[in-house]
Image (tube, helix red, strand yellow):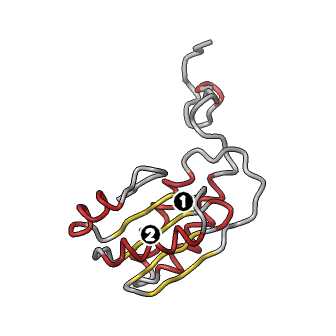
Amino acid sequence: MDFSNDGFTHTNVAELAPILRFAFFSAGERSLEEVHTFAKYAADCGIPQVIFTMGTRGACGISQGQFWQADACVIQPVDALGAGDAFIAAFLYTFWENGGSALLAAEQAAHFAADCCLHYGAFGHPFLWRKAACFPQAPKLD
């Protein structure tokens, strides 16, 4: 479950906990103490994998009762649109591929999300179909 920025409360986490295996939280504006406290709460509710992304401060979480923390990748971002979704996708893939190491999954996910930030997102950056190599016969739209 992706709880996003401020879309999580103690109540909704507790209600959803019994059906969750993974809970992702975005906490770029929250202090590390707040993150630790809420991660422990979510884990105590029964969520096996609790993951917090914190922007340039990296990611942290609790995996099967053990706290872990991963660094962010230092880059010069172009656009952060989609970075959270990229992190989640890469985390889940790497977690299953590596046999269940949340720390390793977070480290790999941080690299993937950072790479996504080196490219423009979808909004405000129109894609010119006729310039795309994969659509050489695209009609001229402008």
For mark 1, does the 10 Å Cα neighbourhood hold few (<14), some (14 to 19), or many (20 or more) residues? many
> How many numbered marks are there?
2
Residue name at image x 57 percent, y 69 percent: 59
Residue name at image x 55 percent, y 67 percent: 109
Quarter occupied by residue 30: bottom right
Instruction: Give the camera-side residue of 131 and 102.
Output: 102
Residue contact between numbered discs 1 and 2, judged by CB atoms under 8 Å: yes
The answer to whether residue 136 is above or below residue 22 is: above
> Residue 31, how many percent across, how many down?
60, 65
> Residue 101, how many percent across, how many down?
46, 83
Q: Amino acid at mark 1?
A: Ala
For mark 2, does the 10 Å Cα neighbourhood hold few (<14), some (14 to 19), or many (20 or more) residues? some
The answer to whether residue 72 is above or below residue 119 is: below
Q: Amino acid at mark 2?
A: Phe
Residue name at image x 59 percent, y 15 percent: 140
Q: Could you say whether the residue bearing mark 1 is in a helix, strand or loop? A: loop
Q: Quadrant of the C terminus?
A: top right
> Residue 45, how many percent across, how many down?
29, 74
Instruction: Give the camera-side residue of 142 and 43.
Output: 43
The answer to whether residue 124 is above or below residue 74 is: above
Quarter occupied by residue 132: top right
Residue at far top of view: 142
Residue 115: mark in rendering: none
Residue name at image x 44 percent, y 69 percent: 38
Residue 38: mark in rendering: 2
> Residue 51, how many percent across, how many down?
46, 69
Q: Quadrant of the N terminus?
A: bottom left
In whole angstroms, how far apart are the C-alphas of marks 1 and 2?
A: 10 Å
Q: Could you say whether the residue bearing mark 2 is in a helix, strand or loop? A: helix
Residue under label 1: 27
Going from N to C along the chain, the mark reached first, 1 or 2, is: 1
The answer to whether residue 4 is above or below residue 50 is: above
